[in-house]
Image: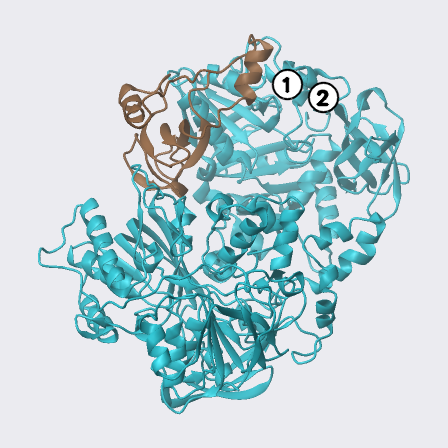
Amino acid sequence: MLILTCPCCHVTAEETEFHGGGEAHLKRVGPDGAEGDFESYLFMRQNPKGVHLERWRHVYGCGKWFHMARDTATLEVFGSYAAQTLAPPDHIVDAIRKRHPDWQWPAAS
Amino acid sequence: MSTRLATGGRLLNKSKPLNFTFNGKQMRGYEGDTLASALLANDQVLVGRSFKYHRPRGIVTSGPEEPNGLVGLGQEGRFEPNARVTTTELYEGLEAESQNHWPSLEFDVGALNKHLSRFLPAGFYYKMFMHPRPLWKHLYEPIIRHSAGLGKAPKAADADIYEHFHAFCDVLVIGGGVAGLQAALAAGLSGARVIVMEQSAHWGGRAPVDGGTVDDAPVEDWVAQTLDRLRGMENVDLRDRTMGAGVYDHGYVLGYERLRDHTPEDAGPRHRLWRVRAGHVITATGAIERPLSFAGNDVPGVMLASAMRDYVANYGVSPGDRTVLVTNNDNAYLTAIALKQAGLDVPAVLDARVLPQDSELVAKAKALGIRVVMGHAVSSVQGGKRVTGVAVCSQGGEGAVLEVIACDAIAMSGGWSPVVHLWSHCGGKLTWDGAKACFRPDQDHPPTGADGHGFVTPAGAAAGVFALDDVLHDAHAAADGVATSLGFKLPRDLTAPTAARREEAPMMPVWQMPQGASVKLREKTFLDYQNDVKVSDVRLAAQEGFVSVEHAKRYTTLGMATDQGKLSNINGLATLAGALDAEIPSVGTTTFRPPYHPISMGAIAGAARGDTFQPIRRTPLHDWHAANGAVWEPVGQWRRPYAYVQSGESTHDAVMREVTNTRQNLGLLDASTLGKLIVRGPDAARFLDMMYTNMMSTLKPGKCRYGLMCNENGFLIDDGVVARLDEQTFLCHTTTGGADSIHAHMEEWLQTEWWDWKVHVVNATEHYAQVAVVGPNARKCLEKLGGMDLSREALGFMEWTEGELGGFKVRVFRISFSGELSYEIAVEAGQGQAFWDALLIAGHDLGVMPYGTECLHILRAEKGFIMIGDETDGTVIPQDLGLNWAISKKKDDYLGKRAQQRSHMQDPSRWKLVGLETTDGSTLPDGAYALGEGENENGQKVMQGRVTSTYHSPTLDRGIAMGLVLHGPDRMGELLSFPGTDGKTYEARIVDPVFYDPKGEKQNV
């Protein structure tokens, strides 16, 4: 059971206080989207053994969604940040690169 | 025979004898005994039958690693299967029953299996029971089910209570042996908050039995002094009878405290589950001795050498009069010496090694007159229910018998395995220590915490350090490192105590005894006692291609029993490695998973059972319902009245009466559980256009509209009536189950996609009591209350208004889920009961009656209205349900629009909603499937539809149903047949889903 820190209310709490929401920074594809783009938006998810940018919601707290950078293999947490961003902020990228110097975002596919 | 010695027994209180029974036989022990030591003291060496071959089995160990001594304890609500005799403390009146035997422990029919063992090799079930297929269901499975299972599940409800503790500490020390105590002392003196967990009732671990001197005094004195110091420290919490059960992410640890197992008559919780967040975990979990693999190593009377000296020293019990020791290391000589010093006979020590010169312990044994035979081994054990002798051979040979030594017990030692489970639970890696022939923690690869650094440190024997002096220094260093990393500092003058050293000759890895054992011997050589896995089984698995250790484990069931392979694991891996001609580290280990040792289901549940299992949500009218015959239906955490049963009625009668009365007179429904979300802001209309398939932005204030909500996959997730309160404010009704999830769904889109839109959502579900006033007399009833004009002209269908009704501040929605003239009226929650009472008085002469959820379902089904969760199941789109009229064609976008354009969603062969009418008026079984033509590629009959809702309609006096049917709307009048699970086949005609008042005249009056 992880320990998470909510960047909105700054509470550090047990995972049971939160709810995971899968991969972060997905871009919505609407009615005009091409078949392939829509498929990718709806179904294709990263499943890395390593750094993962993911969505969480502080459900039994302030109720806010936020993003967290985490290593899925070592469970190291690089930091959490507001959900209202289109890319991980610099301080998160720096924290990740300290451990994984070659890490790139978005991952080359 | 095994018996109680006149002297010894450091844990016993001989002034307090205790009575207990085993298989109904009266026996006596002392306070301080375990059930195992008490059984041995009563010469009860045979304690159970093995799982597969029903071989007689005796006690092998003195701790939680025990594979054989499993018993059923207690009676009724206090019955517990698979209790280990070695970890069960004796108490007055204890009742134990052995397991896996029929008709009796002494004479067991299943033991015939052992004569069939040549025909029951690894993978036997997979191979044998495949063919012929029909035999599986009627012959094989019933027989296997009858003989499978370890122990019996209790039938009565658990009579005890359990609890959870949440705790936080800087350093959690798991294990209260010398390593754990030294680590706790150092960490405690650094000022850190420390919790120490010891699984047994005693501190000091093996040290008091194995002896030694610390700072020139007996180690037992050091243990006592250290305990005193720790007890005097406010920042240290010592917990005995508490096992570290599992280590999880980010320093989360479960502890399992057995508070009342040894005093079951006392009040208070039986077990306590500790949920600890630790800054750092020190695993001082010790090591477990390994058995040796020789033929007959499972005969009762064969025991681990360390366990044997435990019984002598701790409990004053001799496991046998004449004990042969067989070993590959020096440590086991302690047992021969202890037995001899207790006045018992040790006819020989068979040592697989050939030492160039006697080490300290070998010399000591010889000095006591014990015959030590080097380079020798056990060829086979003689005896059935009890050891009678041992056939001796050379370790290097194939088992030719050199002599037979008469004995009634055999002590064996194959070396020691560090207990690495807790280290491994959360990802700590292991490394193979060739010299000690064991896996130990690879401290360069610990389990990592949130900061990316290791949060577990092993200490002492758990780290692969065995000599007393090394253990103390290792534990001290571990605590020093941990305290420093957490920002604490050990006192400058604090150093590790020093223990006297003993020179030991190196051990010799022995995985098969003798080295070249024949097939015949290997077939009698057990690796996993509890699951009856033999050396020959593992070799067969390797031969058949199960070369991965995880596959071999599952194929042979090695290590899959309740002891999780604590004894068998390393011997099994080594045997597999031998069969594959590979190195042990390259074969690797299986995965260690929590809990370390089985914990009770009660402890896991804690207080969450019965009334406290989960909160119950009650509407403001709950008590009235309860007092008026409500039969409850759980809807999520809510309780809703299913029907109000009057005296002399069945529940079905009540439902029929409620439907008829509502259609003919006046019904009241407590609709308070329906979700009420207030969506407000300059962008509210735009937001709801995205949330709903309908166009909500064109809704005028004062009007209501029925809306559908889909997810991005296009599937229908919720429905309900939306009322526009003003230009910027909407009230969205959701289903009862959807109130929280749809609120969360809206929040998710607002926070993560359209965070620049100015919209605010509030879940006001519990702020209001809502009552549906339904039926031809609805308006008359409300007019009697007075205060508002609710005429057809003043408040049309699908309009809402607010005002005062009978003195209550109300919001009235003229909406109908029944097809009748209907008003849904919201009042503040606190006014709910008073308003309900006022309606009952006003409706008294108008035939008013409350109705429940089943009546609501029938009313809506008669009208062909869908119900989320009945007509939908997460794979249904609105188009399947003929709801195209509620999907705006003018909008560019809404959630699910793009998905509904996918080819599969547009496929004309999707099953669509129709009504179904049985030809004989009976009611279709719920969920029944309609048969199609022919069979699919798996030989299953093709289906062409299914029933989604089915009821007996009292209005039409016949069964009515809705269902999804292939090309259904184009097949009106066709007959379908629905096989039921009752063996009958039901014929039904496809009809329009609106069974009653298709023109909607009744609701529009």
**Front position in the image: B493 or B274:** B493
Query: B366 left or right of B3?
Result: left
Q: Disc 2 residue type?
A: Gly
Depth check: give the residue in front, B757 or B76: B76
**Image colour assigned to chain B:** cyan
Q: Is residue B477 above or below residue B880?
A: below
Residue B846 visible in image = no
What is the x, y in percent for residue B662?
A: 69, 40
Q: Which chain is brown?
A: A
Q: Which residue is depicted at the point 22% across and 58% down?
A: B473
Instruction: State the residue position of label 1.
Output: B886
In the image: residue B988, left or right of residue B873: right
- Label 2 SS: loop
The residues tagged by marks 2 and 1 sit, at their Cα atoms, a distance apart of 9 Å
Measured from the top left, where is residue B880 in percent x and y? Answer: 71, 23
Label 1 SS: helix
**Residue position for label 2:** B882
Which chain letter goes with mark 2? B
> Would you identify the image quadrant in which residue B922 lies?
top right
| Quadrant of the frame with the C terminus of chain B | top right
Residue plotted at (66% across, 28% down): B875
For the residue carrying disc 2, how many other residues have a C-alpha within 10 Å: few (<14), some (14-19), or many (20+)?
A: few
